[in-house]
Image (cartoon, helix red, strand yellow):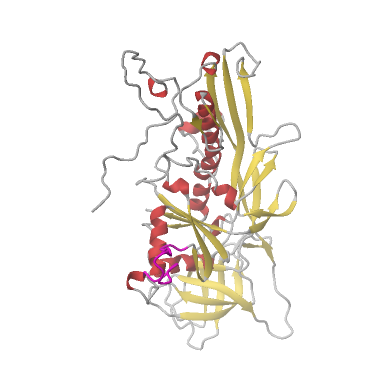
Amino acid sequence: MAVNATPGVNLIPSAERVALSTNYITNFDFLNQYLPDTYEKEFERYGNRSISSFLRMVGAEMPSNSDMIKWAEQGRLHVKYTQCTSDEAAAVNAATWVVGDDLTPTIPGGTTTAGQGGIAIRVGQTIMISDNTAGSNLTNKAVVSVVDYTNATFEANYYEAGGQAMAAGVNCTIFIYGSEFKKGTLGMVESLESDDFIFDNKPIIIKDKYQVSGSDMAQIGWIEITSEDGANGYLWYLKSEHDTRLRFEDYLETAMVEAVPADDASGAAAILGNAAGNSAAGSDGVFYSVGQRGNVYGGGNPVALADFDAVIQRLDKQGSIEENALFVNRQFSFDMDDMLAAQNSYGAGGTSYGLFDNDEEMALNLGFTGFRRGYDFYKTDWKYLNDASMRGGLTGGAINGLLVPAGSTTVYDQVLGKNAKRPFLHVRYRASETEDRRYKTWLTGSAGGARTSNLDAMEVNFLSERCVCTLGANNFFLFQNA
């Protein structure tokens, strides 16, 4: 058995740009002796239709007075290279190694050699060398005797009597674990400078408007409208104005989640960017930032502990944030519930977990709100991913969930000129002493109290200018179908 495709989900928009017959009563046949028994109050068949709240739960809003938001994030403390090869055959006591990792603009490990800009390996340091070949367990430990910063090469002198374990040209990983010097020698040559990663984002301007003519404002309707904030009445334009406001507030969040930067010479850059189609349009939304700088789980949902173990092992290599929130769609939530229930070996099919105490009046809780496996994970449904008029039900580009680290991080704020604590995810909006563009709304026209023009209508205008800052995107996880 399955859910029938018909009747399906109604996606006909509730908002119309013009007054249509569907908005008003049309049956004025006074010769009909049978009058219908009408319900005056409209029924809220979709419940609370708003999908916003995600950013309010995990972030904060802070003012900014610039077209560009910049921040610095720490690089790694230790150095590791993953694409190194030796030019010598196996069994030699010393060999020259070439570092093939991309050293620009920053080298792996987040450090650079002062005055050189090359590899971060120095004379006297001790290194671990590991063969990258699948199934191999060949390793060496060595001390560095010569470094050529210009050509990104160094000479390794092995501790093992058998010399180099790997053949020439084998791709290896090398990391520094310490140093060793002879008695009575000079100190370490060269020093390392910390290398920060600089990120930036720009705010975008979001607008909306609702317009109603003065004549329609003077006409009463026959349906008592309701709204999510508790407003009610028989004036239809109040309903439409409220829905416009609610829709705008949702867009304030979804634009921050979905925004992408416009490519140079793209259509969006031609309309919204600088001259000659150069991109100054768009912004880095949450999904974009995590997809570019974070972690992505593709190919569906992790449905077994082994799948989640792969996620956890990746988090180990990143910031190792202790507590994380999972914002997921309904199917991903079910998959996690089933995965956790399968760990119960005391009941058939896992039915003994939850609120069940042999009482027929007690509910059986078949869901979990979180679990701990290496880290703490707290699960919550994200309405945006379930809503049929938004991301719910998508096939192409479907996002099933987002892992967000909890707490805050310390970053260097370029505007403040000092380190500041910021939530991993937060919104910056344009504001100054004279202009606050966090959430602007104003009336224009000549109706409904407005006295700004000779337009026989009331226009309700909405505007915001903002962007989202995804700090430490390497600690986030995006779960998608492919």
The residues colored magenta run 351-368
Name the outermost residue toward the top: 454
Q: Is residue 301 visible?
A: yes
State yes or no: residue 353 in magenta. Answer: yes
Q: Quadrant of residue 439?
A: top right
| Extreme residue in the front direction | 33
Residue 241 higher or lower than 286, as above or below? above
Label total for image: 0
Q: Residue 112: percent from the left, percent from the top?
A: 64, 62
Where is residue 180 shown, x and y percent of the image?
A: 65, 81
Provide the major secondary structure of the magenta segment. Answer: loop
Image position, residue 92 (x, y; %) = 48, 82
Residue 138 in picture, x, y percent from top left:
44, 80
At 53% from the left edge and 48% from the top edge, which residue is drawn?
Answer: 286
Which of 12 and 427 lies nearest the eye of the viewer?
Answer: 12
Q: Does the image show residue 277?
A: no
